[in-house]
Every structure is written in structure tokens, then in C-alpha cells.
Amino acid sequence: MARTTQASPFFPGKPVPPKHFVGRSMEIAAAFDQINNRSHMAIWGGPGLGKSSFLELLTSPQVWKEHGLESDLSQAVIVLLSCESINPFTSSGFWQEVLSCLKDELESEPALQTEIQSFLDKGQTTKESLRQILRKLGKKHNKFLVLLVDDYHIALIPNQQYSEPDMEVFLSECRNLAVHSQERQYLSMIVTSLKRLSELGMKLNPNASPWYNHYLFQPLKPFSDQEVDQLIIKVLNIDIQAAQTFKPVILAIAAGHPGLLQIVGSLLFRKLRTGELPNEEAIIKEVESTTKQIFQNIWDRCSEQEQTLLMLLALFNLKGRLHKKVKFDLSGIDLIFTQKERDFSNLEEQGIVVSVEKEGKRVYSLASSIMQQWIIQEIWNTDNDLLHKRQHVFINLMSREQVEKVTNAINWLWKHKDEVPSNVEWIVKVIAALPSGLIL
């Protein structure tokens, strides 16, 4: 196989540069519609689904031109920041970061830069300061601010310097700036969060308009089959036969999860670039060793009920894979899955599970076979004390008879680790079961 010196088009663990961005055409169009109308958008999705990459894309002049907004680009001042960089998060810290970043983007407007610096020097970093700058930005300079805020969920978590009343004031200020102030015509704000904003933050006042209802909500879901194909084309450019060979491996490991796809794609690209054709076992083992922290992050961000449902799903699917070897009974447990469709819908949108319609019933499975094995490992690491602590979640989800079945299954798993196949064995079986039409 020929070697190549082409740079890798994959960027595991960091935002994908705009020139290498793939897919999301409908979401991008929706974002530019909001910007064009000086409206606002809230994008949400689980870890690794591409939220930061999406915001990076919106800073690209080329992408603006491709969407027919070249004239708007000349008027737009684009500011991209992350709430994670404001530590600890406070309202004044947020407005200070916005003003500082805005100042950096106004090299062609030295008078405005001087005014912003005056606010910064005096410690006057408030919503009112930004409002004054927006007024001059729009009226005197015929420009508007595109404010791209990553990790906005941080602003909905209290800390020692940021109480719930502080949060209420901050969110009210953001809404006021976006909806009620005259300067709203000079602002479009796009934020990202791990969950839908309506599921985060403070309790709502039933007599007041929700603080978040000025946003157009847009989830970032796992890649579609077509978007996965677009990503794999980057490998096809090196060796079409190899990419066709490994597409089933990629799907079994990563499904449509963009973060996992970047890892698998990077590994395959590196191997193929050196002229090496890696075998399935080598790919699986290397991906397994580099994704542990990703799965830990996904797991930690799930609620107790979601974690328990994932454990039940992993056990139920394991029973199906072990067939006659299994010595525990989980009959009827799948009824719980049909009763918790909302939870599974959320997990599916985050790229953790996938589902298919079978005989009029929705059947769920873990999106990644490595995630399946990771959850089994988590069950192995659950001792009796931890299992006892989960009993209250079990009771809320199922009958006592079902709790006993699950407990017996976990006890069996503790004692028979050697009968559970490795990821290599597992994924090879998954690949063999995939439809032949998957090949590009």
C-alpha cells in the first residue's frame, strides 16, 4: 500500500477546523437564519457531539459566503468564547470576557476599543456597558455582534461566588438584552449546552415568561449514515478499498458519535498514511485504550436513573449475546425500556444508545460496542455497598421481582467474568451481523 504525506483531516479531542467540518447542513442553515434575523439560538447535545466545532464553523468567512451572507459578514463582529474559561463563573466575569473579546475584534474601530478599555479599567463590566457599546456599534458603525457562547450550561450552575439569585439576575439580563432592549437589533447570540436549557437552571416563576424562550432550540444529534459516509470519504481519498473494508469496524465502534468517529478516523488515517493495513483487533484495542475517559465523562454526566437504565440495557444485551452460557433470567426487563421512552430518547439524542423498530416495538442497544463493554466493566466495579445504594433507583424503575432478577444477574456477572467475550470478539460478531449494504 502506498504511503502518503497528506496531513490528517481528523482532530480527536479538539474542535474540528471549519475547512474539515462535515455534515450538519440543516443546523448550519438554521443558525444563519437566526443570525440574519438578529435572533438567537440554543444548541444542545452530549459530550463529543460537535458543539464547539459547530461554533468554530460559524466564525469562518468562507462559510458565510457559501450561505450567501457575504454582505452581512462585512457588518458582523464575531466573538467566540467559552464559559469554562470564566473560573469561577460570575455575571461580571462573563460581561468582562465578552467586552474583552469584543475589543480584540474591533481593530478597525479604535474609538470603540478605547471606550471598552475604559469600562474594563474602571471595573464597569456589566450588561449596561455592553448595551452602550452595541448601540454605538449599530448606530455609528452599521455593525452588529454575533456572540457565540460555548459551554453555556456553566452559567446555570451556582458556585460560592455565584448564587442562585445571582444566576436569576444574569439570565434576566441576557433575556433583556436579547428581547427588550433597543440594542437587540444589533445582537445575535448562539449558545451551546450539554442539555436543553429548559432542563437546566433555576425553577421557573409560573407568572413570568421563561427566561429561555427567546432561543430557537436546536439539538446536535449523532451523525446520520450520510454524514458518516462524508467523514469516511476523507479516508477514501487515501485508499478506497481500505476504507470500504473498515467502514463496518468504524460503525461498530463509533456508530454516529462525532467524537468517537474522529478518534477512529485518526487512527485509521495514521495507519494508512504509513502504508500499513491494520487488522480489526489492533484498531479495536487502540480505540479502547484511548476512549476510556470519553466514556467516563459520558457516564458521569448521566443521572442515576439514566445510569441504571444503561446498566439494565447492557445486561439485557449481554444475555442475548451469551445465549446458552447465561445463567440468569431477565425476562420482562425490556418492558421497562418501553416505559422509559423519554429517558431513552434523551440518551439516543446524546449518541449513547440507538434504536430500531421491530415488530411494532422500539428495541434499544448501546450505540458503541466499546461503550457496551465499558458499562459491563462498570458493573464489575460495583461492589455490594454501591449496589445497595442503587436499590432506591431500582425500586423506582421496577417491581421487587424484577429487582431480584437484576441483582441475581449482577451477582452472576461478578462470578463469571471469564465468560464475557472481549471487545474484539464482540465487535467482530457485530460487524458480521451488519447489512452488506453498508459499504459505500
Image: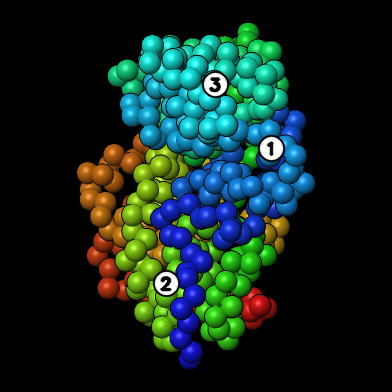
Label 3–label 2 contact, CB within 8 A: no
- Left or right? Give the position of 394 relative to 56: left
Q: CA distance from mark 3 to mark 2?
A: 47 Å
Q: Residues within 10 Å of mark 3 (few under 14, many from 20)?
A: some
Q: Residues within 10 Å of mark 2 (few under 14, many from 20)?
A: some
The residue positioned 26% from the left and 51% from the top of the image is 382
> Which numbered disc flags the more N-terminal residue, 1 or 3?
1
Q: Quadrant of residue 122?
A: top left
Name the residue that disc number 3 marks.
112
Tell me the quarter of the image containing the C terminus: bottom right
Q: In the image, residue 411 lies at what x, y percent?
A: 28, 58
- Nearest the viewer among 241 and 310 is 241
Q: CA distance from mark 2 to mark 1?
A: 40 Å
Whether residue 389 appears in this view of the structure is yes
- Left or right? Give the position of 119 relative to 42: left
Name the residue that disc number 1 marks.
74
Q: In the image, residue 315 lies at what x, y percent?
A: 41, 59
Name the residue that disc number 2 marks.
267
Q: In the image, residue 348 lies at what x, y percent?
A: 56, 51
The residue positioned 48% from the left and 91% from the top of the image is 1
Q: Quadrant of residue 354?
A: bottom right
Mark 2: which amino acid?
Answer: Leu
Q: In the image, residue 73 lies at what x, y percent?
A: 68, 39
Which residue appears farthest toward the top when viewing the image?
A: 207
Label 1–label 3 contact, CB within 8 A: no
Q: CA distance from mark 1 to mark 3?
A: 17 Å
The residue positioned 45% from the left and 27% from the top of the image is 100
Q: Kindly report which numbered mark, 2 or 1, lies closer to the viewer in this rendering.
A: 1
Q: Residues within 10 Å of mark 1 (few under 14, many from 20)?
A: few
Secondary element at image label 2 = helix
